[in-house]
Amino acid sequence: MKNNIRVERAIKNITQADLAEQVGVSRQTINTIESNKYVPSTVLALKIARVFGKTVEEIFTLSEED
Amino acid sequence: MKSRFLFPYWCRYLGLVLILVHIPIVMFKKDLGFDLHGAPGSDLFNSHHLFFMTTTLLMAIGLFLVAFAKEKIEDEQILQLRLDSLQWAIYVNYIILVISLIFTNDTEHILFLNLLIPLVFFIIRFRWKIFQNNRLIKE
């Protein structure tokens, strides 16, 4: 699964730590999601999308191996 | 997501203290007058058995608290790492158990290994994964 959290964060001008605090996880978790090492749960994906005011599909997309 | 059945964060330090207290007691057990794991064939609750029981419990409870204390931020990734590490620990434990059952008949040490390995391996694997994630963030 791919995501464009890093881009969205740059647009909104917030750090990983800010995003982590707003969705209630650790900074490490946001970091591993951004580098595609960890796939978030649906709940967390929805929370992240809500922070950016977008739908989940606009932020997370399936990759070829999924 | 809520993790259930975990000890509060400070229990990790309590656990470490228990383990640290246990080490010198076992190291100097000869000086304290206990040189056996329990004199063979003797009654329960003699001094050797009590010593063995107390030190083993001290260590097991210490490891247990360290292994199952909450992290500062207990999120879903930590939960997954915990579960993953637990699976690894059980695998390693049973592999060693099977090997030692085949190649030895020293049941006392097998019991002791069986008591230690799941918790020790779990702690090492879990901490290693957290360390890796922390290192990743600094890059």
Image (cartoon, coloured by chain):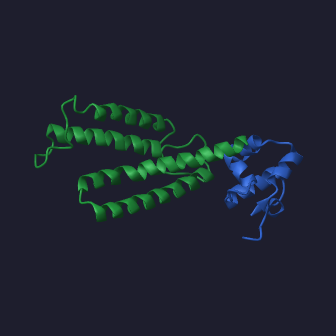
Chain colours: A blue, B green
Position of residue A63 in the picture relative to residue B7 (left or right): right
x 20%, y 39%: residue: B50
Position of residue A52 in the picture relative to residue A47 (left or right): right
Seen from the viewer's position, the closer of residues B50 and B8 is B50
x 86%, y 46%: residue: A10
**Which part of the image, by quadrant, shows the N terminus of chain B?**
bottom right
Instruction: Identify the residue at the far left of this view.
Output: B42
Seen from the viewer's position, the closer of residues A18 and B111 is B111
Q: Residue A21 location in percent, x, y?
A: 71, 42
**Which part of the image, by quadrant, shows the C terminus of chain B?**
top right
**Taking the image as drawn, is residue B74 in sight?**
no
x 49%, y 43%: residue: B69
Q: Quadrant of residue B52?
A: top left
Q: Quadrant of residue B95?
A: bottom left
Please tell me whether residue B93 is drawn above or below residue B68 in the rendered image.
below
x 72%, y 54%: residue: A33
Instruction: Identify the residue at the far right of this view.
Output: A11
Count of numbered marks: 0
Position of residue A26 in the picture relative to residue A4 (left or right): left
Q: Residue B98 location in percent, x, y?
A: 35, 64
Q: Residue B120 location in percent, x, y?
A: 43, 48
Q: Residue B121 location in percent, x, y?
A: 45, 51
